[in-house]
Image: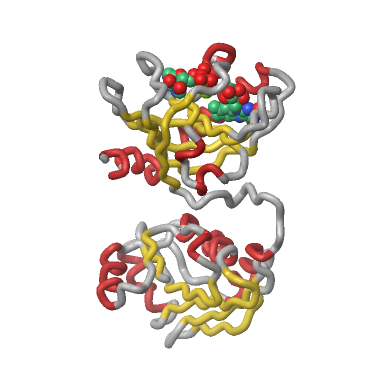
Amino acid sequence: MVAHWSLLELASIKAADDEIRCWHGNLEKLPHSWGTYDAVFLGHSPAMAFSASTLFESVISRCRTGARVVINQSRGNDFLAPYRELYPHILLRDLPELEELQSMINNLPLDFISFQSDSSAYLVALEVNESPSETPKEVNYEDIGDFPLYASAKVVTGFGRGSKQMGVPTANLDPEELPKEVRELPKGVYFGWVQVRGEGLDAGVHKMVMNIGNRPTFADSDATTVEVHILHDYEGDFYGKDAAIVVLGFIRPEMKFSSLDALVTRIGEDIKKARSSLEEEVLKSYQTDRFFRM
Ligand code: ADP
Ligand code: RBF
Ligand code: MG
């Protein structure tokens, strides 16, 4: 498996061997379902916009216990010095020298194996001593879902309470039509983009918040429902139409509220969170995803 920022780089890897799985972009977004690794090689990227400790956390969560993490810059740390003067806005980071690296891994489940930094090479080997991915836990809400999740399903009738009592209409999606990955997400509130498809309907792709669960605040039924509140004013109802969704993130677990007011207030906060998250460039780009042009 190769993760890289450059599509050109990935294309040439694919051209050489199409069996190699390629991931374009941020390692943090790499789905955990892609696997647990025995060894990770980090080619040094001096243009990296985030810190090495952030990167380590992301790597560790994808490694088994005992896995090796190798950082390599075959020309050594000094080699970058002239470039850093030329491009101070691009070359953001040095490779950490021993002391800095030690403090970085201090609070992480990483052991030192070897360290070399001189004019001929920079080469560090670390070992993951306790992988969090193997630590059993109930639901790890920090690490939910392999987003993006794509799905579409028919809008069915719910309990007729959403809009009337709360001012938050929710398009209930037919659970039978939803893929397992969506239906079986941990109960909670998610966000993403949605498009309602049907003749004469606004075909825009809009922001949405989605609740999956059994609404513990109410005593209606135990059935798990998947409901989408769309941040857009539609002219009327659209029961029976298809809603296409892309789920991009998790907001919070489903909770039992002591009053309707408390729930509505909280939903207001969920909406705020979804609105701002979906303005982030990477998440915004899904609004024009090919999925919505079908
Ligand atoms: P139900 O209990 O049947 O789901 P709701 O009171 O939750 O009823 O209303 C949901 C219905 O309202 C949706 O199925 C849809 O047809 C309509 N609707 C109109 N605008 C929206 C919106 N912005 N978001 C979600 N549903 C909406
Ligand atoms: N119901 C709950 O009982 N607890 C929740 O935490 C909860 N969170 C929700 C968050 C959002 C964004 C939305 C749209 C709904 C949520 N609901 C929650 C579901 C709500 O109870 C349901 O939409 C109405 O009861 C209508 O069926
Ligand atoms: Mg509803």
Q: For the view shown, which residue lies furthest in the bottom direction? A: 120
Which residue occupies the foreground of this view, 49 or 5? Answer: 5
Does the rendering let one see residue 208? yes
Quick check: 186 above or below 68?
Answer: above
Picture residue at 53% right of the left edge, 84% below the top: 116
Does the rendering let one see residue 266? no
Q: Quadrant of residue 223?
A: top right
Q: Position of residue 186 (x, y in %)?
A: 61, 44
181 horizontally vs 187: left or right: left
Quick check: 40 above or below 280?
Answer: below
Picture residue at 55% right of the left edge, 69% below the top: 36
Q: For the view shown, which residue lies furthest in the front direction? A: 176
Q: For the view shown, which residue lies furthest in the top direction? A: 164
Q: Position of residue 147 (x, y in %)?
A: 47, 49
Picture residue at 44% right of the left edge, 48% below the top: 148
Q: For the view shown, which residue lies furthest in the right direction? A: 258
Image quadrant where one finds the C terminus: top left
201 horizontally vs 108: left or right: left
Image quadrant where one finds the N terminus: bottom left
Quick check: 188 above or below 64?
Answer: above
Q: Quadrant of residue 91?
A: bottom left
Marker count (numbered)? 0
Which residue occupies the foreground of this view, 205 or 159? Answer: 159
Q: Position of residue 233 (x, y in %)?
A: 39, 18
Ligand 2 location (quadrant): top right
Which residue occupies the foreground of this view, 249 or 245? Answer: 245
Q: Position of residue 45 (x, y in %)?
A: 41, 68
Picture residue at 31% right of the left edge, 68% below the top: 10
